[in-house]
């Protein structure tokens, strides 16, 4: 148990794991702690496949414990790209990236990671099915070694998800046992970002081929992470045990057990009684209650996800962009953050994240809260006070209903008659009828480029345009440029212009605040939350009890 | 007797068919499983592929006919979440639920019936008042409140018992208590009122007047007659053994059929919901059938009535 771990032994453990080769580490007596983490949900799909589980909660159990990519993310930093299963990479040309694989990496079944596993991971048997890249033909890879062909059928949504992540990937060229090339059909400056994205993690080819069915494999995927699946009971618990041959050093924990505890009160009670070491998905209004007990703290905060209000510009009252602009200026976003989030999240600079690096438009901001301007815009628009329906799900997002009520009041102050209509599900929210005008949404950025957010969600193939809520010819042209141009300065100018169009001139949406997730734990446990759903339990982020 | 059984069986089959139809209509009309299971943020083409794979694009009547004919052939379908057979998922969870509901049923019977009888036999005494106040309290406090209070006392404050999960028999104590206390309260109230009604009957007075000792009057005349309404309530309790612990399983993170039902409904995982409902309906109907038969055993007038009706 955690209680048996002292500061000294923790330091010794961490130190030995880093310094000693893994074969010595294995020989040590296993007095590492085993921890239990209470979560609201382990995985929506009941499967542990990164291409099937498309949820935030999945990210928590996958990273950094189970799945690893060639290019990793700094989970305890700012999510910037770091070497993962590849130690270095370079551009060959606008369509090709070459990566050197880390040598000596062992999968959970003892196999060594080679270029063949990488090629198989990005092959049609596991990833793309019969889909074809946007330009050119799939590269055929002749495998040199290995067992029988994988004949298992992928769920049809897996190739669809994979092709959305890699629309123009022709395939992987194996240069040698430890060198691969990603070859794209079109020029793409975001290839490195896509290699680091959720869904591009590497799996063991033999384990996939030996599994009887896709489901069998997806409940116990064999990967390279510091922990491997020991037992998975869907909707109940997931037991991960240390993978002592992990390339990054002996994992500091003997096992990690995620248990599904749907009730918030039960998660908190379990934490306070010592049954769980971590309680996740803590609502913001419970933070102060937990921290009243000086032995506990609530960690966490912003994640790569922004909450938005989305507009349907076909609605008669919203056709005039002045009305939508008025709505964006009528919102006191900081008041929402302070009152509903205990000030523990932020109002971001529009639909972008600092980890975009050079593509981050640092002098951009969301429309300023300016009630006078909002009222003027309403007046200029000629709006007569007709109702504007606001389709609302009851707390699908944290604080969603309270936020909607605050927004409706703020819009009312500006002279806008917004009527909340509570709906039961997303089908009803997205239904194309004349009463669709305003709704809620959240957007993520799966990799460090605006293609992953602005283009993916609001571009011509994004949900908002596919649902027929909004379109803009200039933005659509810019989306193509952002996806295909290799001129970084032009790409940044294009993105800035897209922000101007979608957030100011012809608002498609308005960003309210960054989303956040909160994890409660004993203060004495030296561990740091990531700025993401991911929970990092590698040696460098575990000090045991301090 | 055969006709009696056939009529009951026909009614039972009709009930099950109606339950299945109702569940299909409600679930399919109230949400798109693709948007829930794949999440609204999944790529549109992935959602479309999911819909096509599970036939969710077909007209609703066609989906219904397909589903109903599959049930007729004993095929209960697969979970849309992970592709596993729905029946397998449900059967895996039944032992966990029975591990709570059977001891809870024993607790309800063991406490509720004796307490009700005692209170009736000592009507208006201090103990009667105590039993009834306790019963009303147990009956009116919602199980999620009772469960959380028990956790606060025995897990958080005293640290004696775990607050949730299913790792050992100790994990079952609080959920069984939560289920058992509420049920025992209901049973105590029913038993008491049934006993009081019987104790006021003229045949009890007659038996006493004839000099039959009071304990024999109670055993021979009062208890069998009071058993009829009590058996009805117990029948309901037996019928809810499979899915009668939805709230308690959620509060205590107990991986039983109730939890599975909540998750399956939330995901509109039709095959799993239908499978559970079929099992629940069949359990409930069987329990009712047994209760009907027990009526005949307990009350000779019903037997003679059925015979008279058969002539």
Image (cartoon, rainbow, N blue to C red):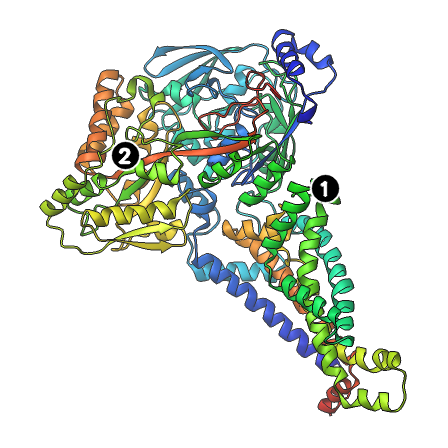
Q: Which image quadrant: the N terminus of chain B?
A: bottom right
Across and down, in percent, residue A383 comes to 13, 51
Q: A188 or A525, which is in the foreground?
A: A525
Q: Nearer the viewer, mark 1 or mark 2?
A: 1
Q: Residue A231 got which mark?
A: none
Across and down, in percent, residue B71 comes to 59, 60
Q: Residue B160 got which mark?
A: 1
Q: Is residue A469 above or below residue B303?
A: above
Q: Which image quadrant: the C terminus of chain B?
A: bottom right
Q: Is residue B242 above or below residue A54?
A: below
Label 1 – label 2 distance at C-alpha:
57 Å
Residue A494 position by quadrant: top left
Q: B4 or B148, which is in the foreground?
A: B148
Residue B102 position by quadrant: bottom right
Residue of label 2: A459
Label 2 marks a residue whose chain is A
Across and down, in percent, residue A159 comes to 45, 34
Q: Is residue A210 above or below residue B88?
A: above
């Amino acid at each position: 148990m955690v209680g048996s771990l002292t500061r000294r032994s923790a330091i010794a453990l961490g130190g030995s794991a880093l310094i000693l080769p893994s074969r010595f580490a294995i020989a040590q007596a296993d007095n590492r702690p085993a921890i239990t983490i209470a979560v609201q949900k382990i995985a929506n799909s009941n499967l542990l496949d990164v291409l099937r589980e498309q949820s935030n909660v999945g990210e928590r159990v996958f990273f950094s414990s189970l799945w690893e990519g060639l290019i990793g993310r700094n989970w305890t930093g700012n999510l910037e790209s770091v070497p993962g299963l590849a130690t270095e990479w370079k551009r060959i040309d606008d369509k090709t990236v070459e990566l050197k694989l880390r040598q000596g990496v062992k999968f959970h079944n003892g196999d060594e990671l080679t270029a063949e596993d990488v090629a198989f991971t990005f092959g049609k048997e596991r990833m793309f099915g019969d889909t074809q890249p946007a330009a050119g033909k799939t590269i055929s890879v002749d495998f040199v070694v290995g067992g029988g062909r994988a004949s298992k059928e992928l769920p049809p949504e897996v190739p669809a998800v994979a092709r959305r992540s890699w629309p123009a990937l022709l395939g992987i060229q194996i240069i040698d046992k430890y060198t691969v090339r990603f070859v794209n059909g079109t020029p793409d400056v975001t290839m490195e970002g896509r290699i680091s994205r959720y869904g591009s993690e590497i799996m063991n080819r033999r384990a996939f081929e030996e599994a009887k069915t896709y489901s069998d494999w997806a409940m116990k995927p064999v990967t390279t992470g510091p922990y491997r699946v020991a037992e998975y009971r869907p909707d109940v618990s997931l037991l991960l045990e240390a993978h002592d041959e992990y390339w990054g050093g002996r994992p500091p924990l003997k096992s990690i057990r995620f248990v599904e505890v749907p009730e918030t009160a039960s998660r908190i009670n379990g934490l306070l009684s010592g049954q769980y070491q971590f309680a996740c998905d803590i609502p913001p209004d419970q933070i102060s209650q937990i921290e009243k007990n000086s032995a506990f703290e609530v960690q966490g905060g912003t994640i790569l996800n922004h909450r938005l209000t989305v507009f349907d510009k076909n609605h008669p009252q919203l056709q005039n962009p002045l009305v939508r602009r008025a709505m964006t200026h009528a919102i006191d976003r900081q008041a929402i953050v302070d009152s509903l989030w205990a000030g523990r999240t932020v109002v971001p600079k529009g639909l972008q994240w600092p980890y975009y690096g050079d593509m981050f438009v640092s002098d951009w901001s969301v429309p300023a809260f300016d009630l006078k301007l909002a009222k003027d815009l309403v007046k200029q628009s000629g709006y007569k006070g007709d109702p504007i329906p606001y389709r609302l799900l009851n707390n699908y997002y944290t604080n969603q209903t309270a936020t909607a009520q605050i927004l409706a009041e703020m819009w009312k102050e500006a002279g806008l008659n917004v009527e909340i209509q509570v709906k039961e599900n997303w089908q009803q929210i997205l239904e194309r009828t004349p009463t669709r005008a305003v709704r809620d949404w959240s957007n993520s950025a799966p990799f460090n480029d605006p293609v992953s957010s602005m283009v993916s969600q609001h571009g011509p193939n994004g949900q908002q345009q596919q649902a027929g809520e909004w379109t803009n010819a200039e933005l659509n042209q810019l989306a193509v440029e952002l996806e295909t141009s290799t001129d970084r300065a032009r790409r940044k100018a294009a993105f800035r212009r897209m922000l101007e169009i979608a957030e100011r001139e012809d608002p498609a949406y308005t960003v309210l605040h960054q989303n956040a997730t909160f994890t409660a734990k004993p203060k004495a446990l030296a561990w740091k939350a990531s700025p993401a759903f991911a929970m990092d339990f590698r040696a460098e982020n575990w000090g045991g009890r301090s | 007797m055969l006709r009696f059984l056939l009529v009951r069986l026909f009614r039972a089959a009709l009930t099950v068919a109606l339950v299945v139809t109702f569940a299909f209509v409600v679930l399919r009309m109230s949400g798109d499983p693709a948007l829930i299971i794949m999440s609204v943020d999944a790529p549109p083409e992935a959602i479309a592929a999911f819909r096509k794979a599970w036939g969710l694009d077909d007209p609703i009547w066609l989906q219904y006919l397909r589903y109903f004919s599959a049930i007729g052939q004993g095929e209960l379908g697969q979970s849309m979440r992970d592709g596993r057979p729905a029946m397998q998922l449900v059967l895996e969870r039944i032992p966990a639920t029975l591990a709570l509901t059977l001891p809870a049923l024993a607790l309800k019977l063991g406490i509720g019936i004796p307490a009700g009888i005692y209170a009736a036999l000592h009507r208006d005494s201090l103990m009667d008042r105590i039993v009834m106040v306790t019963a009303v309290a147990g009956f009116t406090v919602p199980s999620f409140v009772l469960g959380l209070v028990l956790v606060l006392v025995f897990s958080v404050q005293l640290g004696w018992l775990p607050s949730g999960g299913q790792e050992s028999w100790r994990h079952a104590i609080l959920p069984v208590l939560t289920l058992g206390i509420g049920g025992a309260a209901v049973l105590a109230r029913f038993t008491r009122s049934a006993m009081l009604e019987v104790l006021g009957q003229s045949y009890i007075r007659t038996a006493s007047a004839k000099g039959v000792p009071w304990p024999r009057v109670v055993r021979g005349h009062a208890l069998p007659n009071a058993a009829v309404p009590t058996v009805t309530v117990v029948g309901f309790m037996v019928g809810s053994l499979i899915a009668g612990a939805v709230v308690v399983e959620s509060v205590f993170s107990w991986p039983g059929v109730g939890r599975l039902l909540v998750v399956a409904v939330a995901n509109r995982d039709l095959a799993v919901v239908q499978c559970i409902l079929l099992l629940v309906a069949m359990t409930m109907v069987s329990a009712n059938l047994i209760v009907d038969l027990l009526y005949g055993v307990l009350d000779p007038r019903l037997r003679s009535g059925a015979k008279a009706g058969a002539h």
